[in-house]
Amino acid sequence: MKKQVAILFALLASFSLLISCSSDTESIEDIANIETPKSYSHDAVELELLDLVNAYRVENGLNPLDIIEHISYKSEEHNEYMISTGTPNHDGFEQRKLNLEQVLNATRVGENVAYGYLNPQSVLNNWKISEGHKANLEGNYTHFGVSIRMNSEGKRYYTNIFIKK
């Protein structure tokens, strides 16, 4: 009888170890699937738009925003998507928002997009006269990023994302 109890105990202990290993393995896989912040290299036109947005915010008594390259990386992904569909849109915003919440610990996310404007000043001027875009420009944010990409016809697509950390 003692031998049977010992064997039963050994089997139960082995079974619980298997469950624990399985659980740990899932945790490692979950960690492996979390995206890490991506780097991004801004060109002069993108930096000009970021400077113009910050100048506008300061003129209106708001804090300037700090650049985070990962936000610009996500902006670039969206520009590539808009170029592929041929239309400016906010498709996939919830996924970008979730990514920024997970990767950067964002507590608030906003996004401005535009298409066809020739330069950063013209796109900013138009965002300022649009209620929704202006709300993002003047929003309670701490960081931002931008991407500007051209399609094959030379038309520019703009994505400017704002976050609060």
Image (cartoon, grey):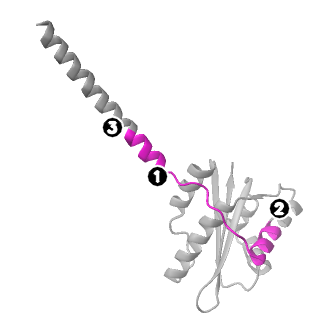
Q: Residues under labels 3 and 1: Cα distance?
A: 17 Å
Q: Residue furthest left?
A: 1
Q: Residue tagged by mark 2? A: 57
Q: Residue tagged by mark 1? A: 33
40 magenta-colored: yes
| Mark before the other along the chain sequence, 3 or 1 | 3
Cβ–Cβ below 8 Å for labels 3 and 1? no
Query: 99 or 52: which is nearer to us?
Result: 99
Instruction: Label 1: state its secondary structure.
Output: loop
Specify whether 6 is left or right of 130: left
Q: Residue tagged by mark 3? A: 22
Query: 17 or 130: which is nearer to us?
Result: 17
Q: Residues within 10 Å of mark 3 (few under 14, many from 20)?
A: few
Q: Hey, what amino acid is under mark 3?
A: Ser
Q: Which mark is residue 146?
A: none
The residue lying at 38 percent from left, 41 percent from top is 25
The residue lying at 25 percent from left, 27 percent from top is 15
The residue lying at 72 percent from left, 72 percent from top is 127
